[in-house]
Image (cartoon, rainbow, N blue to C red):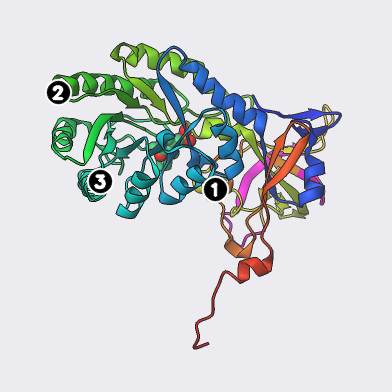
Amino acid sequence: MDHFLYRDGELYAEDVPVAEIAAAVGTPFYVYSTATLERHFRLFDEALEGIDHLVCYAMKAASNQAILKTLARLGAGMDVVSGGEYARAIAAGVPGDRIVFSGVGKTRDEMRAALTGGIRQFNVESEPEMAALNEVALELGTRAPITVRVNPDVDAKTHAKIATGKSENKFGIPIARARDVYAQAAAMPGLEVIGIDVHIGSQLTDLEPFRLAYRKVAELTETLRAEGHDIRRLDLGGGLGIPYARGNEAPPLPVEYGKMIKEELGHLGCEIEIEPGRLVAGNAGLMVSRVIYVKSGEDREFLILDGAMNDLIRPAMYDAHHDIVPVVEPQAGAEQRPYDVVGPVCESGDTFAKGRNLPVLNAGDLVAFRSAGAYGAVMSSEYNTRPLIPEVLVHGHQFAVIRARPSFDEMINRDTIPEWL
Ligand SMILES: *Cc1c(COP(=O)(O)O)cnc(C)c1O
């Protein structure tokens, strides 16, 4: 459920007409709904009611300061995957003891920054990383709390580019090697082993792969405890999918996911962490774009938008489907036509949809890409020297630009000319 609905014949973001935002900030832009962000965070929080837990929002999904603050106010932790994300979380007022640090390539500088600024735990992904973290912690005269991310070799049944839990993926250590790696960790004086971490992929639409992975984690918990490790926290990653196409079967709900977690892991008495990203932010955002031209090809019509692959790369990158809806509500039974929906970037990959049936549209009309809140703005670029598009946050009747569109001068002035030119 989200808060982007038609009202009086036009699309609203909460209580603000989308067309009003378009008039104020220009197109294209992203718009997020506070109520949807809050609702989705709370669904996860409530799903784990009754067990000690922390929901750490995977901020790589959408990391604007205003979004982080919205969630942090509700008590969210953050899952960060870079020094930049760590700095963003701290800047948004998230206390260090609610920040977990994931990622396969943490540098010593990043480790230092997190150990100095405060960190809940590092999710360590390899033996060399473990050794480096031990050294950095010792240099700083501290101990780094860690879990080890295990790779359970489970097929997440999702797009190959976002599957992370198979043995051929770069993530985590093979679960079969876990005993050995935990023994090494326990012998490192700069590390404090507190738990186990797993994250098998993104946009999972079935609970079974999670269940298989969590069962392996439960077994490993018992094994490691028997060997003397104080396993008291389980970080179960993120990955629960969202319905990108309306009308298709919906993925499991957070409450069902929470129930499964309690079934599989509740008896262990561990604190549970989860790291949802997409499900918190995905349906909380739209990308709004304007039709520049309707162009007739030989055998098809192209809807040429002012938004492009550099603004929303998911269709080009993952063949992802986004529902596209006109901002003016179509009349019931209105004529539909198949369109190839494209952007202005000079690549054929700059195609959002092929043969998509949409109500008849004309130059100047506004359209909204639904489910664009996660992995949208954060993955955008300035390819073709197209400015990063603004982000807008709606809260009831109010809206605010939370990242402004840079001017051409601002973009150009980021470059510097060497003295010999
Ligand atoms: C990307 C990622 C997540 C979030 O995944 P979603 O599918 O957005 O929920 C959580 N944890 C880790 C380690 C990740 O890399």
Q: Which residue is mark 3?
A: 137
Q: Which residue is mark 1?
A: 378
Q: Locate residue 181: give its quadrant.
A: top left
- Residue 129, x across and y down, in percent: 25, 47
Disc nearer the start of the sequence (2/1)? 2
Residue 100 relative to residue 373: left or right? left
353 falls in the magenta region: yes
Image quarter hosting the N terminus: top right
- Residue 152, x across and y down, in percent: 27, 30
User: Does the residue at mark 2 contact the one at mark 3 (Cβ under 8 Å)?
Assistant: no
Secondary structure at badge 3 equals helix
Secondary structure at badge 1 equals helix
Residue 16 relative to residue 161: left or right? right
Indicate which disc residue 228 carries: 2
Specify the amino acid type for callout 3: Ala
Secondary structure at badge 2 equals loop
Region in magenta? 344-366
